[in-house]
Amino acid sequence: MTDSIILAGNPNVGKSTLFNALTGMRQHTGNWPGKTVESAYGTFKYAGQNYSITDLPGTYSFSPDSADEAVAGGYVKEHTDSAVVVVCDASALERSLILALQSMDICGRVVLCVNLLDEAERKGICIDLELLSERLSIPVFGTSIKDKRKKQKLVSALRRSIPADCPGKIRNDRFYYVEKAEEICHGVITLKNDHKSSFDEKADRIFLGKYTAVPCMLILLALLFYITLVLSSYPSDFLYGLFEKLLDYLSSSPLIKAMPPMLSGMIIDGMLKVLCWVTAVMLPPMAIFFPLFTLLEDFGYLPRAAFWLDEPFRKCGTCGKQALTMCMGLGCNCTGITGCRIMGNEKEKIISIITNSFIPCNGRFPILIAVITMFFVPLAKSAGFISALILSAVISLSVIATFLISRLLSRCFIKSESKPFIMELPSYRKPDTLRVLVRSLFDRTLFVLARAVSVAAPAGIIIWLLTHIDINGSSIFNYMTDFLDPVGRLMGLDGTVLTGFILGLPANEIVVPVIMMGYLSGSSLENYTSLSALAELFRQNGWDVFTAVSMVIFTVFHWPCSTAIITIKKETESLKWTAVSVLLPALLGFVLCVLFNTIVNLFR
């Protein structure tokens, strides 16, 4: 027989961490509300008994005011035979108890887990668990971040739980739950001191200060990119050299030599060289950027950045939750688009989805890094520092565009009233470096690289065929570039670059290899396994600093990849909004490139 358990709780109370400890799974934990926008499922066994467990989205209430609340509340109401384990933050017990009281109204078996006791103790907060259990008439157990007996304590509490009668529905008056929660906590909570940790207070004065919040945000962003750019150059050069030797070895192998020239060309000069390029360019930056980004998340800074961005987003007609989806988009636009379910209403969700592709994802970062390194770094002595500043400016431009387009949509096309952004800022925590490295490597870096490689392999073959199949003395690829060349020249680019972006629809990672093959006019990628050689190839085809700027602009603002487009269609269930999400960033990129190229031509 299997006992069914439902994990419920506010955002950032360690619910997903408890889920991972019980099941041995690696569900990604986040320091912001709505990170888990769908339920996670798992099983575990203890003392011969099987248990199934469901981790619901983090929510402050079961009242269906948003998608995460609707998912969580609806699931509990449909599974009243399951035991609900409500996970609470020991340092914010009153707020967390509201969800426990609602659970007791709609479910027969409720267990309370008071988590993060170590953090509460650090703040001088003591909880009388026995008195709390007596007042609620349900089992209560306490845990901390490093507690190794979570499974034993949970099972022990479940065995003490007794099914009870319940009304079966939630009261409409939320103040009822607030006043009941206050009465229960009276005498249960003891304060050794009446203020927050001095470190938290001092840090918040800096990170959330009126005059220091923006400089801190920009400095941290620039520092993040600086470390990524400087450290990633060495492993990239190593991989370039390694892959060059590997390809030379394969090209001279008897098996490849025995193949027909067309087949060996598709394999070596098409599939494998594109794979090597994507891996050498993508893997080092991601292996550095993702852990650094996750460290900021675990430290507690990212939710504060989202909290500060609430005001400008509200002025644009949405709310601070859009900042969270924007941060998710830095890793992958598909994740950011899915995360838009946490928005307060359908119209805010659509605005967030449409603008999410304005934020460069991991697939666009290699293009930006490569172009900046090739055309801007040689002009400066402090190469890494200048590159980081340029990349930070590019991201800032994308954020500004997100604000402007969000305001335009909310004022003119998708009018709606924005809801207040309720968010409990987590305490600053010392990140678990080992866990961050493992999680970043397997859950983000390798996952994204595997997706890029799976697209790059067939794309390399298709691109090679397009550049080698002649029709009336010209390749199919040349017909495409000639057709698009007038539009490309108007934008300060050329037809080859636009063809690269079009053929790169499956994944942005293959845009540069497409452009390389196009410029090589049907030859292979031989001798172009380094950025310096690639820069020379681009200059031979008319590129200069101004071309590079146009390339950066269009890299940031163009249509989403095919996977993101499919995700948009699933989330909006609308062809109209899917089309807007594709055309709007492309139109913005086209207009900005044309304006920039026009200004440049006026002064040349």
Image (cartoon, rainbow, N blue to C red):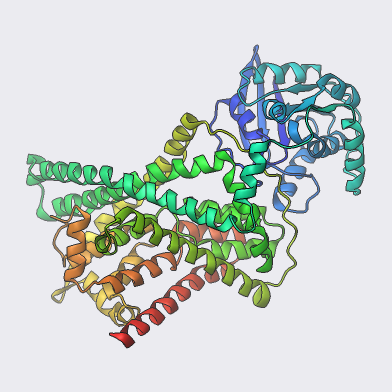
Q: Position of residue 536 (x, y in %)?
A: 17, 64
Identify the image quadrant of residue 537: bottom left
The front one of 72 and 374 is 374
Q: Position of residue 503 (x, y in %)?
A: 33, 64
Residue most extreme to the top: 47
The residue drawn where x is 25% and y is 72% is 544
The residue drawn where x is 55% and y is 56% is 326
Res. 317 visible in picture: no
Instruction: Tell me the quarter of the image containing the N terminus.
Output: top right
The front one of 541 and 524 is 541
Q: Is residue 487 above or below residue 118?
A: below
Q: Is residue 353 above or below residue 230?
A: below
Identify the image quadrant of residue 526: bottom left
The residue drawn where x is 49% and y is 50% is 220
Quick check: 296 left or right of 133? Answer: left
Quick check: 321 left or right of 336? Answer: right
Q: Position of residue 540 (x, y in %)?
A: 16, 70
Instruction: Tell me the quarter of the image containing the C terminus.
Output: bottom left
Q: Position of residue 251 (x, y in %)?
A: 11, 46
Res. 111 visible in picture: yes
